[in-house]
Image (spheres, rainbow, N blue to C red):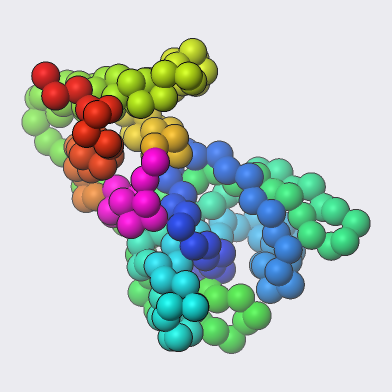
Amino acid sequence: MQIPLFPLPNFVLFPGQVVPLYVFEQRYRILLARVQQSGEAFGMTQILTPSTEDPRPLEARLALIGTLAHLREVAPHEDGTSSIMVVGGERFEIQGLNTDEPYLSAEVAMRPMQEETGDTTATIHTALGSRLLSDLLRLRPEASDAIREHAPTEPLLLASFASALLPLSGEERQLALEAPTLTERLEALIGALPIEARNLN
């Protein structure tokens, strides 16, 4: 499966996240026109190192695991730029890159999370999700009412919701995205919290 790529520094899109983006570079205007016409998703992957610190070309500085972005809304502006809204979909792994277009595209393979077996899996996910939410509320007391109102109950979506609100580095977000299982993703997010925010009981 080949998809166009929209890489960004210090940004990781998680499944179910709804994110606003501003499209201004000419190559990404071309990408946007393509996906508007075709209806296909595009890939979002993190730029791991800035060009000022790493002289290698962009394609050598990308995380190999990213997330499909499904276009929800497009608001074009008079200057040719656009404000768009995307929602995160499936996780993918880059198998190869194509530089023939003005923007990067990639051959990718879908990388769904590993299925966890066992009678207690759902209970573990619920418990970890509850702990993550309580830690998030402890970290962000000024936003507790809004967090309680908007926090998803499904653990996968709760992990995505929390990742957008936690003070995580790009590396920490990438590690959470790459976690093989939902249990490991939830544990990675909890482990990345400042120690003062964690429920250590």
Q: Quadrant of the C terminus?
A: top left
- Residue at (79%, 47%) from the top-left corner? 75
The front one of 112 and 152 is 152
Relative side of 166 to 115, left or right: right
Tally the marks. Answer: 0
Q: Residue furthest front?
A: 196
Q: Residue at x 44, y 62 (%)?
A: 46
Magenta highlight range: 167-178
Task: Give the main secondary structure of the magenta stretch.
Answer: helix
116 falls in the magenta region: no
Q: Is residue 1 visible?
A: no
The image position of residue 90, as x and y in percent, is: 42, 50
Q: Is residue 147 above or below residue 167?
A: above
In percent of the image, x 71 and y 44: which residue is there? 73
Instruction: Name which quarter of the figure residue 103 lies in.
Output: bottom right
Query: Looking at the image, which is closer to me, 33 or 158?
Result: 158
Using the image, determine if residue 81 lies above or below residue 122: below
Position of 157 with respect to 44 (left or right) is left
Quadrant that contains the N terminus: bottom left
Near-viewer residue (92 or 159): 159
Q: Quadrant of residue 20?
A: top right
Q: Could you tell me which residue is drawn at 37 percent across and 20 percent down?
A: 137
Give residue 187's position: percent from left, percent from top.
20, 38
Query: Residue lying farthest right?
Result: 78
* Residue 149: image location, x then y, percent: 49, 15
